[in-house]
Amino acid sequence: MKAYITASFASYGLEALGRHMEIVHEDWRQTKHIYLDAGALAQRINAIGADVLIVEADFVLDEAIAQTRLQLIGSCRGDPNNVAIARATEMGIPVLYTPARNADAVADLTIGFMLALLRNIYTVNQGLKSGALTFRSIADYLTAYERYGGFELGGRVVGVVGFGAIGRRVVQRCRAFGAPLLVYDPFVDPADVAEAGADAVGLDDLMRRSDIVTLHCPDVPENRGLISAERIAAMKPGSYFLNLARSAIVDDDALYEALRSGHLAGGALDVFAQEPVRSDNRFVQLPNVLVAPHLGGATRDVVDHQTRMMVEDVVAWLEGRRPRYVANPQVLAR
């Protein structure tokens, strides 16, 4: 049996799987290549003679599955939306995935953004380094003291939209600061939210009451435009908005205008309508917005998390045991 792995994988994982099968590892971060063409991927799988395929960035489309003899597919993502699961199910191929592999990473960056916004960390750092912020007198210092003093996270109401793996971790971290927490997620029992130390509320209520709104819900059709122009307009003057989910969930024009006009004191964005984001993007140009090029889940630890989860489930499947994370568990009963 052979495995073709294009996902980033820790060496111990390759060694563990290598005890069960022959491994061909072509890390997409090293090759700088993503398979978007089904025919090209199928050709490579067949050239290797792979029975098992484990991907991260590549798209495993219907045609690629149909043109190969794969027995198992692994997607190192929290949501295996890069795999044609319906076709895999039709052909009796289990699809493994790695839920919450990057949840801690995204939650950490969320808190980092919050603190940076509230305490003006980036602004004062750049001001000092560039020479734009100088102190020739006590008056200069007092001016900076008043302007950049900022706020404590513990005294701000944080509204978390989405109470999945990431949202839960954001709540956990905010509790350590003592921040009052509001959560909107219509698919979660309010008792679960209360147990985590937050109040379950409606979305409109959350938008009106929060000093900081942070978005952590999935990019599914029913969430497109969820954060509408009306909801952005209802936010407190001087509040903050963070999006580490997907751009399509937010009315981009309304958010831009709220940030540009000063209705919102600031924002932090890790996702954009056009990616990879460019330096001339209108949000990047705003001085009150912190930006990152979709790096929320990009920690070295995430590679370890996805390796461990995938290896455990692949070995379980090889040994005839039930894998823990299977997107189409119905195939296991066949």
Image: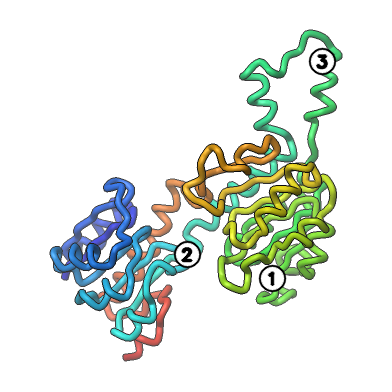
Q: Residues within 10 Å of mark 2 (few under 14, many from 20)?
A: some
Q: Which residue carries the number 1 mark?
A: 185
Q: Nearer the viewer, residue 243 or 25?
A: 243
Q: Which residue carries the number 2 mark?
A: 78
**Alpha carbon distance from label 2 to label 1:** 18 Å
* Residue 275 appears in the figure: yes
Q: Amino acid at mark 3?
A: Asp
The quadrant holding residue 69 is bottom left
Q: Would you say 328 lies left or right of 248 here? A: left
Q: Which residue carries the number 3 mark?
A: 140
Image marks 2 and 3: residues in contact by CB distance under 8 Å: no
13 lies above or below 97: above
For the residues carrying marks 2 and 3, which lies nearer the camera in this image? 3
Q: Amino acid at mark 2?
A: Gly
**Picture coordinates of residue 263 (x, y %)?**
81, 46
**Picture coordinates of residue 203 (x, y %)?**
76, 67
127 lies above or below 307: above
**Alpha carbon distance from label 1 to label 3:** 46 Å
Q: Identify the residue shown where x is 78% and y is 29%.
A: 148
**In terms of secondary structure, where does tag 3 sit?**
helix
The quadrant holding residue 4 is bottom left
Give the mark nearest the N terminus, 1 or 3.
3
Q: Nearer the viewer, residue 110 or 47?
A: 47
